[in-house]
Image (cartoon, grey):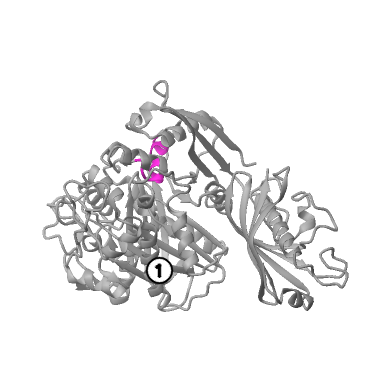
Amino acid sequence: MNPSFSAEILFPPAEKPAWAPLVSRWHQLDGASFALVEAYTSWKQSLQTPSLIFLASEGASNEADADFVKTGAKSPSKMIHTLPSTRSSPLCQAMGWSGPVLCVQKDPHTFETALKEAQEMVGTEYPVVWVLGASPIHSEGTLKKYRVELVQLLEKPKTNFTFPVPVSLLSEALPHRAPMLWVDEVLWINDTQGECRVRLKPGKHFLDANGAVRISSLIEWTAQSYGFVKACQVLSRGGNANPYEQNYLAAFNDFSFQENAASVLQDSSEALVRIEILKELGPLTLIEGQVVAQGEVLASGRLKVYCA
Amino acid sequence: MISLIGYGCSSSAGIGVSHFWESLQSGISRAALPNTQSWPVQPSPTPKICSWDLETKKSGAQQTLVTQLSAAWDKARSTVDFNPADLGVIFASTKGNVEDFIWTDSPPRSDPLTPVLKAFLEVHSLRPTKSICVSNACASTHGAIFLAANWLRSRKVKSVLVLAADFIGPFVVNGFQSLKALSKDSARPFSGDRDGLTLGDGAAALLFAAHHQNKDAFQIEGIAIDNEGYAVTRPSQEGESLGRIYDRLRVAGQPVDLVIAHGTGTIENDKIEDRALTRAFQSADQRPVVTATKWCTGHTLGASGALDLIAAAEALKRQEVFGIGTSRQIDSDFQMDYALQTASRSIERVLVNSLGFGGAHAALVMNRL
């Protein structure tokens, strides 16, 4: 069991916090540092002492950087918060703890990426690993609200699949059902990419009456590949493979096909579809896809996928 | 244990390791005053900053960083048989491309490091299995190597490219100026009259693999990082955090011939390094000699640990110690032995310190087969 915690913290506080005596110059903390300490203090009875902490905040210290610049880039008390890693200092003070802290960034997937790294590292050497992040979510006048998240990892997540993963194990991920499931396997994934295999066998619904692949199907292969890669990413982090109620192709831009695509596929037993997640903006995800057979790129381009 | 199998760098000393090493040997600081007239905020008084190619800075922080990293990577790649399959890439930096957007009204859409990493990967057509950015203040490179070691140990990848760079612009310079951390003229690490640090652009590329028997490879025997809960603005006065790191690395139980100290030239940094080293080696049969690089290239922030690692590798390869060129008289309170001039020396094991703002400390031990 890897418990997770979430809190929304207002800053500046209405009154002096109970933990103030533990943190040097607590009144000079920036909002994110304050929120981290405040949230930790409310959760600490439920937490174990970490052996490693990943500090992973979307937007790094952009807000503190802007605050420093607003002072004419002169204020030392603002300057000290312009490194996202310095947030570990007040936290360590409040915890009475010292140890390894890794401050990592990979926006817009910073927290997820850190979580994956932490899952790989938790074990004998690091029996308790925290992934912790604080980011501003709302401001009204001088009052700001921060979301703080913490996942405490005590064991590696149990995944019941190894690559290649047949899509039958991921059937919850997409609304499609056979015979409209056109992708066969997920070959590999990482934080932002993945690759799937499409077997070119008689009877598949992407073939026309002559047994040739309808070239427009390559767009659907790419969209389905994204769905299954995303499902593997979510499962590998210990989540539910079906995080969305709606999931469909919203648009495609500059998706181009090689002239010889049909003839190459005619002589192929399989095609490989590689996708890369370029940007996630709310429910819309922009991906780049590439369809390859016999070592040749047959189609490539960008798709927008709607997930909500 | 992991191996450093290739490396390259660019800094105020020039592009390539040989320029860097020659500058360290020469005892001459490569500091140069930049043209700050186009900056949105003028630092006052204007500090001394090392800048190796001011022309490239006109194109913006991200482009400059990618250019510098590319120069370093091209040099590293030329020394090693590089296989891009099963590659991990980690970008270590403190502020990345922050200068590109922080002076404008448009809010940034991302942290300032990830776009630089993405741009580098695109330029070099690299599609790594894993990639991430590490921002552990000025100890970022050590943080990246700490993570790289775990990737290689768990066999998630076969090699890891650690890229390290920072851009010295008005945000960074004014930041250090606001803290009164900059020297009036030149950084003089461990000197009795030291008065602060100088800043410098720098970039480095380090390629690591799982344990290599190649005679040209260097072994990272151990690496440890520690963040202390003392104060955001200053480290604990006896260097307790470094002490914990040395205990974890067991430096007291093994001969160390050379220490590349973080050695910024600030009062506090140099004092706590001397105290922690003195404690760690108080019962050693032969104490290591201590040197540093920042007097020469300026403090390159997130890249400084990478440049220090390269200096350590070259010292191991050449069996030579470079001196702290700008320091004439070591602080009389200090107990360690400091190198002030270049000298031949038998070196089997090097300790490389790295200290960051906000209590981020790290060190590693490196040897050569």
Task: Answer left or right for A164 relative to B320.
Answer: right
Say what amino acid the circle numbered 1 marks.
Answer: Ser
Which range is magenta? A81-93
* Chain on which label 1 sits: B
Of residue A135 and residue A219, the one placed in the foreground of this image is A219
Residue B29's x, y, as percent?
18, 64
Decide whether residue A86 is among the magenta residues: yes
Residue B361's x, y, as percent?
36, 50
Of residue B182 and residue A248, the one placed in the foreground of this image is A248
Residue B130 visible in the snapshot? yes
Task: Answer left or right for A5 relative to B15.
Answer: right
Q: Residue at x 49, y 63 (%)?
A: B89
Residue A276's x, y, as percent?
61, 60
Residue A136's x, y, as percent?
47, 36
Looking at the image, the residue that sits furthest to the top is: A15
Of residue B179 and residue A226, the one placed in the foreground of this image is A226
Residue B250 visible in the snapshot? no
Q: Main secondary structure of the magenta part?
A: helix
- Quarter of the image for the C terminus of chain A: give it: top right
- Quarter of the image for the N terminus of chain A: give it: top right
In the rendered image, the vertical position of residue B12 relative to residue A136, given as above or below: below
Q: Residue at x 73, y 62 (%)?
A: A221
Q: Which residue is mark 1?
A: B70
Decide whether residue A261 is among the magenta residues: no
Snapshot quadrant of residue A32: top left
Which element type, helix, strand or loop, lies under badge 1? Answer: helix
Of residue B113 and residue B286, the one placed in the foreground of this image is B113
